[in-house]
Image (spheres, rainbow, N blue to C red):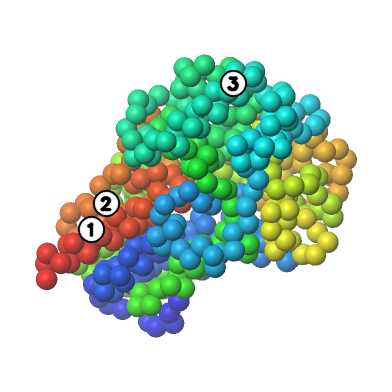
Amino acid sequence: MTTQPLPSSSDVVIVGGGLAGLTAARVLEQHNINAVLLEASDGVGGRVRSDNVDGFTLDRGFQVLLTAYPEIHRHLNIPALDLKIFEPGAVVWREGKGTVVGDPFRRPKTLFSTSFAPIGTIGDKARIALMSAKLKSTDPRELLKGQDIPTASALRGMGFSSKIIDRFFRSLVGGIQLDPTLTSSRRMFDVIFRTLAAGDSAVPALGMGQITQQLAASLRTTEVHLNSPVASIASGVVTLTNGHNISAKNIIVATEGPVASRFLNLPEVASRAAGCVYFAAPHAPIDGKYIVLDGHGQGPVFNVAVMSNISSHYAPSGQHLIAAALPGLAEGDLEAAARRQLRSWWGADVDTWRHLRTYRIPHGQPGQDPPFNPKKSVSLGNGLFVCGDHRDTGSIQGAMFSGRRCAEAVAEQVRLSA
């Protein structure tokens, strides 16, 4: 981050310091193009940030990094993140007890519990295995070209029972896509399920914010200005809220979708909301490194993770950090709703848990209802460019891929005008 005054001109101005903006800056540097990056808040990272609260590491909403994302291996030093891996599969909590639904191909010891888990028929579980094998053998680019209908309809069309849709898919996939109704694109479902099957779910040892901190630290020539909110954008000029103007031949808008739409007069970007409630507890409600799914499929908490079981750095010694994720919900008394539901799972001990913080994220992901067509244009003409997960897929992969595509388009424009 720089302490220099804001410049009056730059080769490129990037508005937004989240994953897409930081990736774009990194790729521009690889093309020997200098940029000024303007971030409205007090730190980079956008939706991928972590906060320290009383010695606990709180990611801004429950998030995981899927190691099968190809773009992370292009831009990140993966060993330096010291990734801590979730067990493949999940614990499905239903009627007062949890059952491990694992990946018997990677964890053979989970075969018995998975076979007899009360989430669906034996046929349902066989279909999951067949679907995973088929998806892993398919190029993800082809998956994004397939027939597109709502995910729930696609699952029923593949022969899955209502029981497994409600007790397993609604919490697992609905949690990832912030869509417990499963109305999102089956194209994205296919990509996500393939990614889950092909790699691991993980978090950096020191929190998800380490991803964007690492990207920012890798920048060498980019000027990063924090607390620099932008008021308006026009061809050739960015105006900050303090009235300062920066002229630039090329401007990249790397904000979240609704903000980009407002700045650039683009079609409205739909939003999937997310809530996350963090609790501190002296004892973990479960052992092991599994995500816990709501086996009733009713929520509002659909996923729970004891983050201190995954990485000890998430909580002080002798304490545990519990993340309760409420996909699709950011309004109301989320703490009370989460505590009430989890009390029905784990009893009166939940009343002793200390509330640390509630995150409400109105735009957790862009909407991805069918027909879903990613890889939208990043070049708008007249030196204006746009990137973010709303231009590709609503994921870390999509944000970084979009940032790279955008920077490469700018580099080509600079080359042609040289």
Residue 409's label in the rendered image is 1
Read off the residue under disc 3. Answer: 124
The residue sitting at 35% across, 67% down in the picture is: 25
Residue situated in front as seen by the camera: 225 or 179: 179
- Residue at the far left: name it: 417
Residue 173 x, y percent position in the rendering: 55, 35
Local SS, label 3: helix
Q: Residue at x 47, y 17 (%)?
A: 157
The picture places residue 332, in percent across and down from the top left corner, at: 64, 40
The reply to whether callout 1 and callout 2 are in contact (CB within 8 Å) is yes
Q: Residue at x 44, y 58 (%)?
A: 73
Mark 3 vs mark 1, foreground winner is: 3
Type of residue at label 3?
Answer: Asp
Q: Is residue 159 left or right of residue 108?
A: left
- Pair 2/3: label in front: 3
Q: Is residue 229 above or below residue 134?
A: below
* Disc sitting over residue 378 in the figure: 2
Q: Which mark is first along the chain, 1 or 3?
A: 3
Q: Earlier in the sequence, mark 1 or mark 2?
A: 2
Residue type at the position of mark 1: Ala
